[in-house]
Amino acid sequence: MRSSSSSVPDAWPYVGTRAYARADDARFVGRETEAAEVAARWRADPITIVHGPRGVGKSSLIAAGVLPLLDSYSADVLPIGRVSRRSSVPAALAGGGRNSFVLALLSSWAPHEAPTHLSGLTISAFLRTRPLRLDASGAPVPIMAVVDQVEELFTAHDRQRRHCEQLIEQIFAVLDGDLPFHLLIAVDDDHLDEVVRHSRVTTPPYRLGPLRREQAVAACRKPLEELGHTFAPGVAEGLVDDLADATGQVEPLLLQIACTALLSPPQPELIGDLDGPDEAIAAYCRRQLEEVAADHFHADPEKLRTRLRETFGSPEVVTSPKAVTSPEVVTETAGLPAPVLKALADRYVLARVPDASGWRIWHERLLPALFQGGALPGGAVRIRPDERLRLAESAVLAGEFEVAARHGRLALREARHDGRLSAAIESLLGDVAYLRDDLDEAVTHYRRATQLYVAQPGTDVLAATLLTATGRVLLRQGRTDEAIRKLQAAARRSPDDSAIQTELAWALWYGGHERTAVDVLDDALMREGNAPEALQARGEILSDLQRPAGALRDLERVRPLQQPSTRAAYALALALSGDVHMAVRAIPPMETVQDGSTLLRAARVMEAAGNHDEAVRLARRARQSTTSPLLPPRLAAEADRLSVTEPRTR
C-alpha cells in the first residue's frame, strides 16, 4: 500500500511516494548500473531474483530502469505481473476451487484480456495461446516475464498453501518446457528465503540497497534539469547529505518526499538555498498517521502517535534527526494490534526486524515527526476517489474488509459523477461482500456495477465479466434460474468467450437442462477447440451421463487434472469403461471433500469395485452435502439409489 499523498503532476520531475512506472523512464535517474546488471542477468538466466528491503525501489528499478533496456524486437516482454487480484477481476470469478493467484497473475500479464477467458487457464496454457514471436533469422525470441512484489503470495489474507504450491508448480512446468521463458522475480528481504527455497536459480539473488551519495545527487538534480531548471552549486549535495544515514546512503523514498515537497513548483531557473526537509517528512508522517487512524483509531491520529511513543519509546525531546541513529527494536507491541502494525509498515512508518522478531521505526528521520506533538500546517489533504479505491484494494488483500468497505463507500460518494470509476468501486464493494460470505450484498453491488458499465461506451467485456460473477454467486445460492438468465446475458455481450459459455452450461446442468448444457459446451468447443474449462466441464458432465468414451477423450486433453471434481470424473469414466482397478487408484482423497458431485462420482467407482459399504457412505455424504450448488436432479436420484442400502457391519 502506498500513501494517497503520492499524487504529483505528470509534468513534474519527481514521482513522489508512488513507484516509478514504465512511462517514467526519462526521469528515473541514478540506478543505471543496477538496471543494466539486472537486465543482463534476466536475458541470460531462466530465473532472476531481485530483493531488498521494503521501499528501496525494486518495482521502480524494474519498471523504469530494466524494461526500457529490452529491445521489443528481440524479446517478447509481458506487462509486469502481480499475484494480488485487481478490482477489475471480481472475487467471485476466483472462487469454486480456482487458483486466485494464477488468475491474478495472468490478468496482470494480459490486462486487456477478459478475466473470464483467463479463469480456467494454467500459466503454460496461457503462454501457448499467445503466438510465438520470431526474430529475423526465424528463431523464437525469449518471453520475458516479471512477477513483482511476490511477497504477496505469502502474506495475502486468503492464502491457501495448495494454491501457492500450484502457482510455483505451474511456473516450473513452463521453465521445464520448450518455451523460451525468462522470469524476473522481485521480493522483499523478509520473504527471500521462501522464494529461494522453491526456485531453481543458477546465480545468486541480486540485492538492491539504498542510493549511494552520487546516485542520490543525480536523482535529485537531473530530472529538474530536464525541465530547464537547476540547483545552485552545492544545494542538491547539501539536501542529500542532510538525508543520508551514518553510512552515507539515502533512502529513495525520503529523497522523493523531500524533492517533491520542497521544490514545488520551481519558478526560478536557478534553485537557491533550501530549508531542510524536516517539514516535508513531518507532513508525510502526519498524513500516514491520519490515514491509519481513520481506519483503526476512530480518526484520532494523536492517540495513535501516543501509542507509538509508548510502544517504541522516545526521548522527551527529539530536536534533531541525528539525535537517534538507530531506532529501537521492540518485540512487545501491546496496544498496537497486528492490522495497525501492518498498515504502518505498508506506509513505511514501521519496519519488521525478522532476526529479532520485532518492529522498529522505518527510518530515524521519522522520529521527530512521529514523537513530537502539534498540528501541521495545511490541514487534512483530500483523498481522491481513485486513490481511495487503491487503498480499498490493499485492505482487501490484507483481509481488512471493514476498512476496505469504508474506503469504498467514501470513494463512491465522491465519484458519483464518474460512471466508470463508480462501477469499479461498486465491483470492489461486491468483492468485499462476497469475501465476507454476504452473497445477497455481493449480488446487489455486482448488479449496480454492471448497470453503471452498461451506461458507458466500450464496456461490453467489463459488463459480461460482472454478469458472469453475478451468475456464479446466484448459482452458489441455489437461485439457478436467475443464474441462467445472468449468464445468458453475459454470453450475449461476449459471444466468443468460451469461459462464459462454460459457466452457462454448468448453470443449465445444475438446473436439470442436461441436453442443453452439453449443446452449449459443444458449441463453445466448435468455436475454440482447446478451451480447457469447456473440455473439463464437458468431460465431467459426460462422465455423470455415463458416456465414458467422450469423457475420457475430453479429460485426457486437459491433463494434469488438478481439481478433485475432475479427477473423480476421470476415475468414474475409467470405471464405466471397465478399468475399475485403475479407476480406484485415480480417485482423489475424499476426507475433506464437501462437493456432492465429487463425492457421488467416488461412490459410483466404489460400487463398480464392489466396495458397497464405502459406496453407500460416500453417496450419503453426497446427498447430505450443503455445499452449493447442490446435486442436479439426475445425480440426486443416483445418490438416493446408492444411499438406500445399509452398509454391511464389519
Image (spheres, helix red, strand yellow):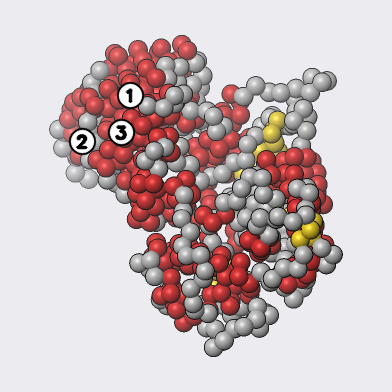
- Is the Cβ of the residue at disc 1 closer than 8 Å to that at disc 2? no
The numbered mark, 3 or 1, whose residue comes first in the sequence reads: 3
Residue wearing tag 3: 447
Local crowd size for mark 3, using a 10 Å CA cut-off: few (<14), some (14–19), many (≥20)? many
The residue closer to the viewer here, 492 or 551, is 492
Relative placement, left or right, of 633 versus 248 is: left
Relative placement, left or right, of 18 versus 612 is: right
Residue wearing tag 1: 487
Q: How many numbered badges does the structure rendering display?
A: 3
Q: Give the CA separation, mark 3 to mark 1.
A: 13 Å
Q: Name the amino acid, label 3.
A: Arg
The numbered mark, 2 or 3, whose residue comes first in the sequence reads: 3
- x and y percent of residue 249 in the render? 75, 68
Write the residue at 75% across / 48% down: 227
Residue wearing tag 2: 623
Dot label at residue 266? none
- x and y percent of residue 1 in the render? 52, 55
